[in-house]
Image (cartoon, helix red, strand yellow):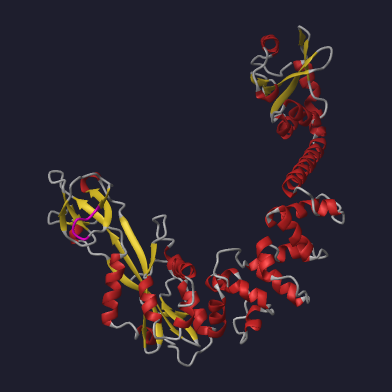
Amino acid sequence: MKKKKNLPETPEEILSYVTPHRMAAWKKKAEEGLATYLFIMSRHHRHIAWCSHCRHFVRLRASRHRKETVCPHCGSTGEQIHGWRGYSRLHDRVIVCQYANADGALIAVATYASVYWHRKKVNREGGWKLVMPWRIRPVVALDSVSIFRYGEGGVMACPSSGRRAAAGVTLDHVMRPHARWGCYSGMGTGTLPLIRVDEASISRAVAGTPFRYTWDALSLYNRTVSLENDGALKVLNRIAEHPFASEALAKMGWRTQDVLARANHYPKLINWRGKTLRAVLRGVLTKEEKMWLHDARPGACLTSDILKGWQELRKKGVQQTLLPDMAATGYGSQLYHNLPDVAPSRVMRYLKKTKCRKEIYIDYISMCRDMDVDLTSKSNLFPRDPDRAHDAILEHLHTKMALEIQEKKRKEAQAQDSDWEKHRAAVERRYRFTADGITIRVPEKLTELIDEGNAMHNCVGTYVRRVASGSTIVVFIRTEDTDERLGTMEIAADGTHIVQARAAFNADLPQDVQAFVDKFEAEKINPIGMAG
């Protein structure tokens, strides 16, 4: 990490900002972040409960296990727990992120709180005794401490214990600030801990500091986005390290505020070291574009794809394609790369006129290229009904893919014909049978299995390998005169029984065909199988 002259460099220097008074307040706030339970431990006193939030015994009007109830003493809402019904898996944990300022620095502290409500201890007789919930205290410890200095950046102290739970471990590792909640994903409970951000504390912390110029400019929505999973650490670090770019984006309007709040979605699109708005956005904004960015009314967003497309057009010298039109139609980098020789204005006019979503149109153009469709033709490039054209080309593509799969299967089947020839004659001799105008036909080539599967709408086309190797036997049921398909029959390799005999679509055989199969079974199927 690059050294910053006013930033602390060691865990001890970072932890010097954690005073006992602050730590006591942070621990209390972390405990309040844990879930609330109303424990009822006596079957005989079902209306007396102990609240884990205010730690008082209270009287309830109704008693029902796992029912959500408001504590009459503190007003917090929690679940009722009947102790005799069992609560051995009741384990709560939470990461609470809080903020403060001191000595011109902004402090961000993550505290980890955990409590196992089902705990036992050894009694005098050497047995186990359940500890009552009101005798259990949550464990609260520092998870990490981050320090931010405006114009320089941020630094974090956290445990070097890797992915293991870090509560209570010495903060001995210094790094760039980032959310630590992912380190708790491997604790074995199957769920991540809750993450709570004290929003009021961050507003108090930035007050009176240069951070307020950016944080106060953010819309309520983008503040919320920044606080998700403690993403505020990244935003605060960016403000501290690149104050001009951050303030420019925050004050330009809610659309660029979204870029700041979700900066990880805009890799390398923003020049954070830029000292002018043009340098920050990597392009010159027109007066109309600035007005659109400042517009507070809800509308189309400035996505990373649109911003990248705008930058690429500006780099190519295209000035007449404006951000409002691009955002309204969804025209961005993807469409620009898919149709590099088509004027952006033509594409945007088409999307606006047909009200076609850009995802549908990009998908359509991509499939046209896969099908070698002539896109120099206007009727193909700009179909009148894009949704119908998309569905039609998708159907053609599926047909093409199905044919390619069939062709691959046929080639694989042809390659195994030599194996089938080794025992085909024996199958023909053993199972040749005709009665009542119906006959058994043994396939000459394995590709006939694929044709049979397609015609009868069953899965016999997938039996090629098994038939070729002799692990099963498949024969066709046909009319004697016209060779009409009546059914498909599978016989066990040892000839002892019929595995299945089905009509088209795997339906039951017609009555006359089933009678034929019964005669066939009586005469041809026996324990000896293919012997003789």
- How far from the left and from the top, in percent, is residue 133? 20, 57
The image quarter in which residue 195 lies: bottom left
Count of numbered tags: 0
Question: What residue sits 71% from the left and 25% below the top?
Answer: 473
Q: Is residue 354 above or below residue 141?
A: above
**Magenta segment range?**
70-74
Q: Is residue 214 above or below residue 220?
A: below
Viewer-closest of 201 and 157: 201
- How far from the left and from the top, in percent, is residue 366? 76, 55
Viewer-closest of 244 and 159: 244
Viewer-closest of 66 and 362: 362
Question: What residue sits 41% from the left and 81% below the top?
Answer: 206
The image quarter in which residue 12 lies: bottom left
- How far from the left and from the top, in percent, is residue 121? 20, 57
State left or right for residue 251 relative to residue 514. Answer: left
Can residue 481 be seen by looking at this rendering?
Answer: yes
Question: What residue sits 24% from the left and 61% below the top?
Answer: 53
Question: What residue sits 23% from the left and 53% below the top?
Answer: 38
- How far from the left and from the top, in percent, is residue 352? 71, 58
